[in-house]
């Protein structure tokens, strides 16, 4: 049953839907989805077009806004907005170490999670659209992985879309996971170099922490084993607009004196735990590389294998040679499932997903080349998470797509830029710029 309530300037309604777990078996098992409808208080009685928001990830539920925060305020000026928790996230059949054993053993869990990629998410959207809009097409706003989903939507069900808006989320149409990470590591290295240029004192601070972790076992409050590779993965924050500053503040007071000598402080460990733990979004770790799975090739821990091609990322060598420690970025590795207690029970499941070879194509280049849906995409000039060259190649492959290439924002531009980013994309899609 739908329940409505109010926040400042907004009327919210909890919406619930039932969809097939496997859309190729519509009479089979079902799962429940949750979405939050938002409409401006002074427009609640109006017949408004719909905007569907698809969150980045994979593995994150839709934003829990308070009132008219960020881009939502601009959207509510003309849309009724549906904030969907994609399958496996938030309140939509959450997938984690507590729920997945209900499916059975690791093989059953892997088969289940293979149905939690962009193609299934798009079919969920099409299944619920008639219930939401009465059958009318809607506008989709896809951030990051949500943009991957929007691109898959254009490939398979363009009839469901009035407009597609994509922010930092134009995927390569044919790159294997190896190609994605082979492009990523040099990009990450540039971000690290820029960070050290801004905060040169962090070169020594990061080296000291790495040296400490290479010679000691350190455990975070939740039981996470903080290895030097895990510490390097804190570089994931460098892809956000304020990420370099956050990393600097984290590093500046990492150690405290103790009776046993200098140790990493409880405050440092607590902050690192919040950044590294997958307890709140385990699906991200489980299907991150599967998002790039197409054809008969396994992803086979692509980020880990490709990292070996970039020897400068080896922490032990950097410490021994007094070279700057390189942080890493948005990547998942086999050791992630050994370090994180939220993931340890799912390690075998992750191994099976990494070995899988039956991934379906996610995108249809021929259909995208004939696209008739208005599409606009924000492409961030040196996006750490999504390769700019891959995005621009895809932009050229989608008929009629208009891009806004900018270095004003990092990957989180739709959060940082809010109404301005959405305004720009709407104007591009409507051919007003």
Image (cartoon, rainbow, N blue to C red):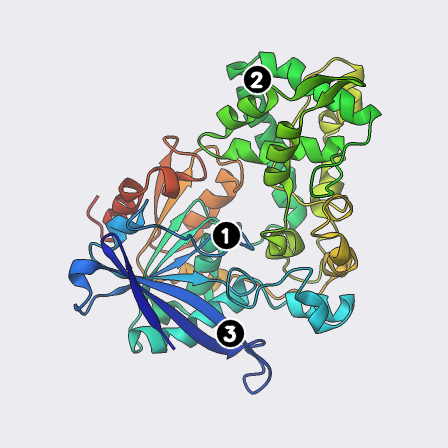
Mark 2 nearby-residue class (10 Å; few <14, some 14–19, many ≥20)? some
Residue lying at 61% horizontally and 36% vertically, measured from the top left: 329
Residue 216: x and y in percent read 82, 27
Q: Quadrant of residue 235?
A: top right
In this view, which residue lies farthest toward the bottom?
Answer: 27
- Compared across the picture, whether 63 is left or right of 199 comes to left
Per the rendering, the mark at residue 196 is 2
Mark 3 vs mark 1: give the one in front.
3
Q: Secondary structure at mark 3?
A: strand
Is 149 situated above or below 230? below
- Compared across the picture, whether 39 is left or right of 256 comes to left
In this view, which residue lies farthest toward the front?
Answer: 259
Q: Is residue 19 visible?
A: yes
The alpha-carbon separation of the residues under discs 2 and 1 comes to 29 Å
Q: Quadrant of residue 127?
A: bottom left
Residue closer to the observer: 99 or 165: 99
Q: Quadrant of residue 45?
A: bottom left
- The quarter of the picture where the N terminus appears is bottom left
Task: Looking at the image, tell me whether mark 2 or mark 1 is earlier in sequence order.
Answer: 1
Q: Is residue 429 visible?
A: no
The alpha-carbon separation of the residues under discs 2 and 3 comes to 46 Å
Tag 2–tag 1 contact (CB < 8 Å): no
Task: Looking at the image, tell me whether mark 3 or mark 1 is earlier in sequence order.
Answer: 3
- The quarter of the picture where the C terminus appears is top left
Kindly identify which residue carries mark 1: 145
Mark 1 nearby-residue class (10 Å; few <14, some 14–19, many ≥20)? many
Mark 3 nearby-residue class (10 Å; few <14, some 14–19, many ≥20)? some
Kindly identify which residue carries mark 3: 32
Residue lying at 43% horizontally and 69% vertically, measured from the top left: 125
Residue lying at 29% horizontally and 51% vertically, measured from the top left: 67
């Amino acid at each position: 049953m739908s329940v409505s309530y109010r926040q400042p300037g907004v009327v919210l309604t909890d919406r619930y839907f039932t969809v097939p777990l496997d859309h190729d078996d519509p009479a089979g098992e079902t799962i429940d989805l949750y979405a939050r409808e938002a409409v401006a208080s002074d427009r609640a009685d109006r017949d408004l077009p719909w905007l569907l928001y698809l969150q980045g990830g994979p593995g994150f539920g839709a934003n829990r806004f308070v009132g008219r925060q960020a881009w939502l305020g601009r959207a509510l000026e003309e849309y009724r907005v549906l904030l969907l928790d994609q399958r496996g996230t938030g309140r939509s059949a959450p997938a984690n170490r507590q729920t997945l054993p209900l499916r059975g053993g690791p093989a059953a869990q892997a088969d289940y999670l293979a149905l939690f990629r962009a193609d299934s998410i798009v079919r969920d959207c099409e299944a619920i659209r008639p219930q939401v809009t009465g059958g009318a097409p809607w506008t989709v706003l896809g951030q990051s992985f949500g943009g991957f989903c929007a691109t898959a939507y254009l490939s398979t069900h363009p009839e469901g879309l009035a407009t597609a808006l994509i922010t930092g989320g134009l995927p390569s149409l044919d790159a294997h996971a190896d190609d994605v990470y082979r492009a990523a590591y040099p990009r990450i290295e540039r971000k690290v170099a820029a960070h050290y240029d801004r905060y040169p004192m962090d070169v020594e601070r990061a080296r000291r922490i790495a040296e400490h972790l290479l010679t000691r076992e350190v455990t975070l409050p939740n039981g996470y084993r903080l290895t030097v590779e895990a510490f390097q993965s804190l570089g994931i924050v460098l892809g956000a607009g304020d990420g370099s500053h956050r990393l600097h503040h984290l590093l500046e007071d990492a150690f405290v004196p103790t009776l046993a000598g200098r140790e990493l402080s409880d405050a440092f460990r607590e902050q690192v735990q919040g950044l590294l733990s997958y307890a709140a979004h385990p699906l991200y770790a489980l299907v991150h590389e599967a998002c790039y799975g197409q054809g008969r090739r396994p992803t086979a821990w692509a980020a880990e294998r490709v990292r070996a091609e970039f020897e400068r990322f080896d922490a032990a060598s950097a410490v021994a040679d007094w070279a700057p420690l390189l942080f890493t970025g948005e990547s998942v590795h086999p050791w992630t499932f050994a370090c994180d207690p939220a993931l340890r029970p799912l390690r075998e499941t992750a191994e099976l997903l990494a070995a899988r070879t039956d991934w379906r194509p996610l995108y249809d280049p021929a259909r995208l080349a004939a696209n008739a849906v208005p599409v606009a995409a924000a492409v961030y000039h040196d996006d750490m998470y999504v390769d700019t060259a891959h995005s621009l190649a895809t932009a050229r492959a989608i008929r009629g797509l208009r891009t806004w290439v900018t270095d004003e924002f990092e990957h989180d531009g739709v959060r940082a830029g809010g109404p301005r980013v959405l305004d720009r994309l709407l104007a591009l899609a409507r051919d007003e710029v």
